[in-house]
Image (cartoon, rainbow, N blue to C red):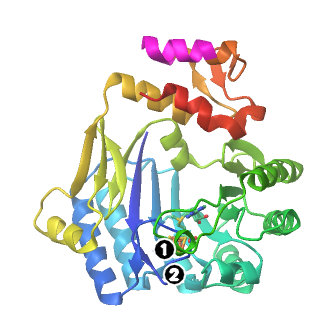
Amino acid sequence: MQGLYVHIPFCRQKCFYCDFFSVGYNEHTASQYAEALSIHCRRYKNEKINTAYIGGGTPSVLSEKQISKLLDSINDNFDTSSLKEFTFELNPESTTEAKLKILKKAGVNRLSMGLQSVNNEMLKKIGRVHDFSMFERAYKAALNAGFDNFNLDLIYGLPQQSIADWENNLNKAVRFGCSHISLYPLSIEEDTPFFNSGVCVNEDLQREMYETAVRILADNGFDHYEISNWAKPGSQSVHNGNYWRNFKYIALGAGAAGYENDFRYLNIVNIEKYMELTAKGMSVKQEDDYIDEETRESETIMLGLRLLDEGVNINDFKKESIKSALQELLNEHKLINEDGRIKLPKDMVYVSNSIMSRFMK
Ligand SMILES: C[S@@+](CC[C@H](N)C(=O)[O-])C[C@H]1O[C@@H](n2cnc3c(N)ncnc32)[C@H](O)[C@@H]1O
Ligand code: SF4
């Protein structure tokens, strides 16, 4: 199994909480960037991929022509004969019927939309450029275009958010009939407007919101299959599943991270330099770290335990340090062994960071 991740580092406006790599959208630069991605794709001629994920930034901010170029470059170069899942991230304000038609025709079969909140006042407060009605319009357009596999992202613990507001978010989101939901606790990242203006998070309240979500989503038929992800039966994310199972993935684009041939790498976090290096046929890697056996085992366990239903196979670990940490956690009842699969018990999910840290190298 091998995935492909493509990073689109453009947004219409930077949200106040976000430190993902992206800059303001500019038609000329984005066209040159689409060309650079196309050159980068050619280096992977006939490489077989099982999943593809176009993320950002804001992929939907690209023009129709730029989206077509990107998708054609992927389909013309990679071997997509066994492609299971092809996801494209959309923001409500830049989703149009014409773009959805292009996505459908090119084989995209899963959409992921950042909704973040259903509350218009909150959306303004966190720097989003859309309101709830724009989301409703975009969602309906996607259904009309024939898409039926849909993820929604929501953030909890936003400034002055109450439990009642959060419950309303969840209830409204599930009413849309999406097949997948990703929930993120607000984190305050350095050099963001939230950080600079001293916004704080209330961890106790975030925990209560998480528990509320676990209850409401279970009541609505969602399986809590990964720490931050819920899916209707059969709609778990295949692409993210590749990450959690520690499989390989190719990264295209400035600031994209990949894992190939035992190396984890990060592409240069600079759009101009990325375009220059691809044009010259040079490597675009800014960091390239060899993953030795022990690191691989420790990553496999930390990622695999995130999959709550599946966990990891006890026989996959040979290193003494990993085996002894596993045994200690089993003795402390912080992990469970179900027929040889080691899993994180659901009541330990909220303290999973401290459990995972026991496997750090
Ligand atoms: C990289 S963003 C890209 C998605 C898309 N551009 C959007 O805005 O909807 C993926 C998701 O990460 C989450 N996210 C980003 N920054 C976050 C933060 N500081 N705290 C919590 N969640 C965050 C948001 O839910 C967002 O939808
Ligand atoms: S949350 Fe999405 S739209 Fe907002 S700045 Fe980050 S990547 Fe861009």
Q: In this view, does 89 lie above or below 5?
A: below
Q: Quadrant of residue 150?
A: bottom right
Instruction: Report the magenta stretch's main SS.
Output: helix
Name the side, left or right, on which 328 lies relative to 175: left
- Can you tell me whether the CB of the residue at mark 1 lies under 8 Å from the nearest atom of ligand 1? yes
The residue drawn where x is 53% and y is 36% is: 303
Residue bearing the label numbered 1 = 58
Amino acid type, residue under disc 2 in the picture: Lys
Can you tell which mark lies on residue 169? none
Categorize mark 2 by other alpha carbons within 10 Å: few (<14), some (14-19), many (20+). many
Residue bearing the label numbered 2 = 99
Asked which secondary structure carries label 2, the reply is: helix
Give the residue at the far front of this rendering.
Answer: 198
Instruction: Judge by depth and name the residue closer to the eye, 135 or 145.
Output: 135
Amino acid type, residue under disc 1 in the picture: Thr
Name the side, left or right, on which 356 lies relative to 215: left
Give the residue at the far left of this rendering.
Answer: 280
Q: What stretch is highlighted in magenta?
A: 316-328
Instruction: Judge by depth and name the residue closer to the eye, 269 or 342.
Output: 269
Determine contact: label 2, label 1, CB under 8 Å.
no
